[in-house]
């Protein structure tokens, strides 16, 4: 529906978004080396071995020995660094890059990394709990990114954001409308879902985790809802 391009929200505390940059770099590295076919032709092995498969996590099935690279519980972490294609990767990294730096600024480097991974794990568990017998792997950073979106809505709802609507129309609108629209799409899609290719429950689980963790992990001097700020 839309792709975030840039926000008018400079860093206030940290000089540079180190963790956000490393997360983006790690996702790009994994995709280029293992999934794109440009270096190693291992897309299927990466998806099946490091994606989170609900029926394996809950021991409802036995893993194919060709793809059993790590214990199934560890895929609750690794799945968020695996993507299904270039557009899947670009979309998720755009959200992380545009919104993640300010959440890292509000929490600090270490807490932001904990926050991001915790939201990703919560997203995977939500998906697995709601689809416990599913054999298709869950991949992508969108669950963790949903937590970042929730944090941004709580901290910076009035910040103006440049987005590319329908892949062609540039708009500059407040984050509350951009990200609120994203949330509305998730809810409507979840209600209309027939358990297709998009893991809507993962998005909602990551978002809920972000709402809960943001007030707990943000710096004490960072207010919610941009109180006292002028944008």
Image (cartoon, rainbow, N blue to C red):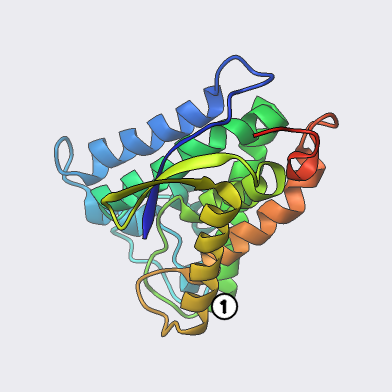
Q: Where residue 48 appears, x then y in whole percent?
A: 33, 59
Q: Where residue 116 appears, x then y in whole percent?
A: 60, 43
Q: Nearer the viewer, residue 128 or 146?
A: 146
Above or below 112: residue 125 = below
The residue where tag 1 is placed is 130
Is residue 132 shown to the viewer in this render?
no
Q: Where residue 28 appears, x then y in whole percent?
A: 33, 36
Above or below 208: residue 91 = above
Residue 101 in which image quadrant: top right
* Residue displayed at 45% across by 76% down: 61
Where's the N terminus, which quadrant? bottom left
Q: Nearer the viewer, residue 173 or 54?
A: 173
Above or below 130: residue 175 = above
Horizontal side, residue 28 vs residue 146: left or right: left
* Residue displayed at 25% across by 48% down: 86
Count of labels shown? Answer: 1
């Amino acid at each position: 529906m839309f792709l975030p391009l840039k926000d008018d929200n400079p860093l206030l505390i940290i000089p540079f978004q180190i963790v956000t940059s490393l997360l983006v770099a790690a996702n790009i590295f994994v995709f280029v080396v293992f999934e794109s076919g440009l270096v190693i032709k291992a897309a299927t092995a990466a998806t099946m071995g490091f994606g989170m498969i609900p029926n394996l996590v809950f021991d409802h099935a036995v893993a194919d020995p060709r793809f059993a690279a790590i214990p199934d519980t560890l895929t609750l972490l690794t799945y968020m660094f695996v993507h299904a294609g270039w557009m899947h990767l670009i979309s998720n990294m755009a959200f992380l890059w545009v919104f993640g730096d300010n959440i890292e600024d509000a929490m600090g480097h270490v807490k932001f990394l904990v926050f991001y991974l915790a939201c990703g794990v919560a997203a995977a568990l939500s998906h697995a709990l709601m689809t416990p017998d599913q054999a298709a792997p869950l991949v992508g950073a969108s669950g963790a990114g949903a937590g970042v979106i929730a944090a941004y809505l709580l901290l910076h709802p009035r910040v103006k954001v440049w987005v590319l609507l329908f892949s062609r129309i540039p708009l500059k609108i407040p984050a509350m409308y951009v990200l609120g629209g994203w949330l509305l799409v998730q809810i409507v899609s979840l209600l209309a879902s027939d358990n297709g290719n998009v893991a809507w429950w993962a998005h909602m689980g990551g978002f809920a985790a972000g709402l809960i963790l943001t007030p707990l992990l943000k710096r004490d001097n960072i207010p919610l809802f941009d109180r006292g700020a002028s944008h």
